[in-house]
Image (cartoon, rainbow, N blue to C red):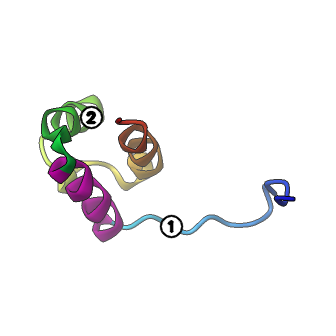
Amino acid sequence: MPEPESKSVPKKELKLEDMRKVLAEKSRAGHTAEIRELLHKYGASKLSAVDPANYEALLQDAEDLK
């Protein structure tokens, strides 16, 4: 049985390298245009211009790409 999610457990801080890895995999899977749209959604034309505070939301959006 999975443990209930606890708000007291700190999440691993996402870094630029982590985001680059995930987005590169999605891009290779044929989602390049969608990744570009997501970057624009977060006010950036490239990943390095995305505010690190938005990494978690961007990661979730990228993982939702099918």
Q: Left or right of 49: which side holds 59?
A: right
Q: Residues in magenta?
A: 16-28
Question: Residue 38 — which label?
Answer: 2
Displayed quadrant of residue 17? bottom left
Local crowd at mark 1 within 10 Å, few (<14), some, or many (≥20)? few
Residue at 50% over, 67% down: 13
Front: mark 2 or 1: 2
Q: Which of pointers 2 and 1 lies earlier in the amino acid sequence?
A: 1
- Residue 54: image x %, image y %? 41, 46
Q: Amino acid at mark 2?
A: Leu
Residue 9 in the image: state x and y as whole percent.
Answer: 75, 66
- In the picture of the structure, the residue carrying the numbered disc 1 is 13
Which residue does the image show at 30% across and 35% down from the upper left? 42
Of residues 57 and 35, the one drawn nearer to the viewer in this rendering: 35
Q: Quadrant of the C terminus?
A: top left
How far is disc 2 from disc 1 in space, using C-alphas? Answer: 20 Å
